[in-house]
Amino acid sequence: MQLVRGLHNISTETSGCALTIGNFDGVHLGHRAVLDQLQELGGELPQVLLTFEPHPREFLGTQSGARRLTSLAEKLRRLSRTRLDQIVVARFDAKLAAQEPEAFIRDVLCARLQVKVLVVGDDFHFGRRGRGDYALLCKSGEELGFEVHRQRSHLLDGRRISSTWVRECLESGDIARANVLLGEPFCIQGRIAHGRALGRTIGFPTANINLTRHPPPISGVFAVTVYGADGGPRAGVANLGRRPTVNGEGVTLEVHIFDYSGDLYGRRLRVELVKRLREERKFESINALVAQIARDADAARECLGLGRPE
């Protein structure tokens, strides 16, 4: 799979492609059904996905509390395991937001991507003030020589699988259902930063990932599996939230990896949330917090099939 960053870096030497466009936040089973449909309809054409960074809702200030399911890095990791030939990450900025939909079709879809088959949702909107829609794409396709198809909804228990549904599951703590919708465990990845080192002083050293910029739609204390530390996947317990007992600032994922003593600063870890053990809450003292962390660690070990430490 080839990753292209920026519309200006798209090669114009191709002879056409099968294309889908969207944010693909979470890369859930509904998204994967779209990619299957793309391959089915595109035949032997190169399979291309066009997505945007930052998320248009974030840039336009219309996010309305909806938090990302996946960072760009995590989204690309999940997409890298599909049958796509190319992913194009377009920078969503004022220029792109102001582009008329007809110009986007002409300059991006046709001139740069040379689209021959396009798969989008019938509620897909693009271009200045969101004026571009499925009907305009169909009309333009007839004039400019490309096919346009509606994406097929992927249902579970009679409901369309969507990023909104995954988000609802996570917000309510139903990680098991969220993982079913995603087709794999929900995870968070990021680079380990220096914290206050409080965990080390109370016997539970943590690796800290700052998530203030893109906080996930879930908080609490979790049994986790960690990837990226030495020795393969490792078990642990994690707190995701604002750490009210110690007057924490911003949203942080603090991970205590069981039976591990290596230096993780600067490394990128991927943390799978296996089960939420409890909600995050404020304790009246550090001693009360330490006692609860010990109980959380025991609960996480049990959840992950580990025995208590000797």
Image (spheres, rainbow, N blue to C red):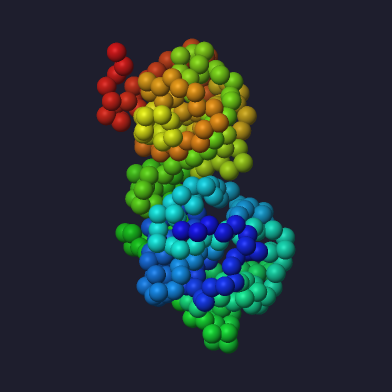
Q: The C terminus is located in which quarter?
A: top left
Q: Position of residue 233 (x, y in %)?
A: 36, 34
Q: Is residue 251 visible?
A: no
- Count of marks, rendered view: 0
Horizontal arrangement in the rendering, residue 295 relative to residue 199 (left or right): left
Instruction: State whether residue 217 is above or below residue 16.
Output: above
Q: Nearer the viewer, residue 126 or 110?
A: 110
Q: Quadrant of residue 187?
A: top left
Q: Quadrant of residue 5?
A: bottom right
Q: Which residue of the protein is positioned furthest toward the bottom in this rendering?
A: 143
Q: Residue placed at 48% from the left, 76% from the top?
A: 117
Instruction: State whether residue 300 is above or below residue 43.
Output: above
Horizontal arrangement in the rendering, residue 106 relative to residue 78 (left or right): right
Q: Nearer the viewer, residue 60 or 45?
A: 45
Instruction: State whether residue 177 is above or below residue 193.
Output: below
Q: Nearer the viewer, residue 209 or 17?
A: 17
Q: Residue placed at 54% from the left, 69% from the top?
A: 124
Q: Is residue 270 visible?
A: yes
Q: Position of residue 292 (x, y in %)?
A: 42, 19
Q: Position of residue 179 (x, y in %)?
A: 37, 47
Q: Residue placed at 41% from the left, 36% from the top?
A: 227
Q: Position of residue 115 (x, y in %)?
A: 53, 75
Q: Residue placed at 57% from the left, 59% from the top?
A: 4
Q: Quadrant of residue 84?
A: bottom left
